[in-house]
Amino acid sequence: MLAVLLAFALLMVGCGSAPQVGDGEFVASEPFVAGSPFFLVHPTSVDYDAGAAIRPLEVRVRERDGVSVSFQWFRAGAFTNTGGTEIPGATGGTFTPDGPGYFFAVATGTDGESGEALSRASHPARIRVGEVSPDPRATLAVTANQRQYIRGFGGMGNAFWIGDEHGNTRPDMYMQMRDIEKMFDPDGPLAFNIFRIHVFPAPIEDVLSGRYAPFMAQSNAQLLDFVSRVGDFGGYVVAAPWTAPFPHWKHNNSLMGSRTYYRASGNSHLRREHFRDYAEFLRDWAQEMADRGAPIHAISIQNEPTYDPGYYAMLWTAEQQREFMAEYGRVITGANAGAGVPGRGGGRHGRVRLMGGSPHNNVHWNNAALNDPQAREHLEIVAYHTYGDWGTRSAPALDGSPRRETWMMEKNVNTHAQGGAFRDSEWDRIWIVMNEIHHVIAHNESSVYTWWYLKRFYSMIGEGAFGTVNGEILPRGYGMGHFSRFLSDTVRVEASLSGHRNAIGRRGHIAPGRVQTSPGIRGVRVLAGIRTSNPGTWQEMELKAREDMVSVLMFDNRTGRGQSADIRVELPPGFTATSAYGIVSGPNQRHAPALVVLDREGDSAFVSLPSNSMVSLRFRGEWRATGRT
């Protein structure tokens, strides 16, 4: 069933088949209307010379089983998709304006099962004739030089107790299905596609029944539904254990780490004689999830194997991971023993992938296993966290054979003092997170960015603590939504910004020769990604694209009084855009349509980037030549 909600609300979608991640678009900011069905192509703004013929505007929506769609075009008095005057006879997917103005389309359909009427307005388009804008001083040049595959963005479900500023907890503070729908629906406002869950040191039945961790029993009872729904949406579920399931498997005979807070002490490493037992435990856990109708995409051998706290933890050395992968990785991957454990991810069914341990702050900890051919064969995803170290590119993972993606699997930045914790949900506090997401993708060349708890006052949606509203999207959520909606399932290509006095270096990251201890430098950062319908040098990416596309993200993290910079976006050589649109978010708007003016030749566009704001753009078109290296 499809339900229409406005502004910041979730759009509930029922599909005949699993949707393709990243195809749907969403606008969620007043005064713009948000509805359904969902537009794949929005009308494009163009400036024409006097006397030039105006080309037709076009809209296109995602096809849905049992839903027939009709269109109606409107003329507006400003760049908006509300109100307006209906244009008689303009009821097709294309419409040719008779002169300058603002235009948008409304798509209306009927759900074949429920009979419910569905309606949604497209982004508006501005058509100007005979008005020439001055060329912007700043230029963003997008190249066709490929770097790495960007698989997606997301975060963690609940693993431990949470509460409000008074220490109180309620069942609905933990993850609920409505939260999963809001964050992971690819036609929703955020379109996340990475969901990390805890491999609890308890039988799955105990977790589902509430016998284990009763304080979050209501949420845990829905764990299978959460995993299944994310899979339905084309996402990737990754499971990570914090400790072995039995104390005697570890040298300290405890589920905890070696610190004394929980009265655990001694060597918290896994005993060598239990390596096979542990591999079989992980395999059987993933198999039971699949048997219960909730297959996962990957399972990790350990959360933070280099960090020894007083809570659930288990230490590994790099050499121990190498030995485990080389000798027992095949137990989990199923190598030489059939098809392996059934898995699911990216809208496809296959087998569960094996992820290495995600060290606390050093991706190069994985190099011992990566440099061993037998271990590397089973170390299918390289993981790390960025606590205390922003990390650097892991050359063995990217360049070795077989090639491996690196996934950043956890980060949490929040204000510890209660007096300031409420400010984590303010717009100006998003930048430390957005800077790091950019750093992980552009500098570390990782394929995934994963936040800690998705539902928390310092995270992507609120749970009701420190003034947040339970289930309401927070500024950091809208910010990461710019990445996930426009850059998931793309190939990152190099891009450089020149002419802007606040640009941060080549490829939008940091100027050569400057020392950076953290991604906190004030200025403008950029990212760009492409999809192509033609196989190329990145066939291993498992591309789902059926069309050619370029996506661009820019943000100016200066929080002073607003200034805007007009930017010319030069598209990759060989690519011709036929449509363009974008969204902008800032202190007073979230995911609102951005005015993107496409050059009549289709090789460049013009957009304004305000300070303290994010802008994401999408261009659809075709490659005139290979244009890719």
Image: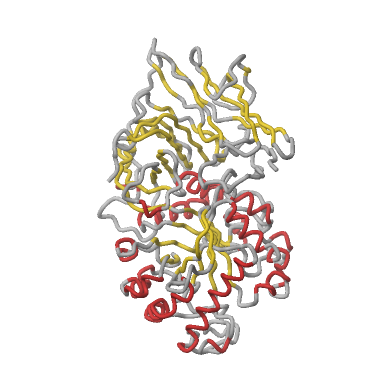
Picture colour scheme? secondary structure
| Vertical placement of residue 492 versus 369, above or below | above
The residue sitting at the left extreme is 513
Point out residue 587 in the picture as x, y percentages from the top left corner: 55, 41
The residue sitting at the top extreme is 51
| Vertical placement of residue 527 versus 103, above or below | below
Q: Nearer the viewer, residue 31 or 67?
A: 67
Point out residue 291 in the picture as x, y percentages from the top left corner: 62, 67
Point out residue 328 in the picture as x, y percentages from the top left corner: 44, 79
> Does residue 588 appear in the picture of this structure?
no
Q: Could you tell whether 604 is left or right of 341 in the image?
A: left
Rendered-image quadrant of the N terminus: top right
| Residue drawn at (36%, 61%) of the image | 517
Q: Quadrant of residue 566?
A: top left
Q: Nearer the viewer, residue 613 or 494?
A: 494
> Does residue 355 appear in the picture of this structure?
yes
Point out residue 423 in the picture as x, y percentages from the top left corner: 58, 54
Q: Could you tell whether 617 is left or right of 174 in the image?
A: left
Q: Quadrant of residue 591?
A: top right
How many numbered tags mark residues here?
0
| Vertical placement of residue 349 versus 326, above or below | above
Q: Nearer the viewer, residue 360 or 109?
A: 109
| Residue drawn at (65%, 76%) of the image | 203
| Vertical placement of residue 564 versus 469, above or below | above
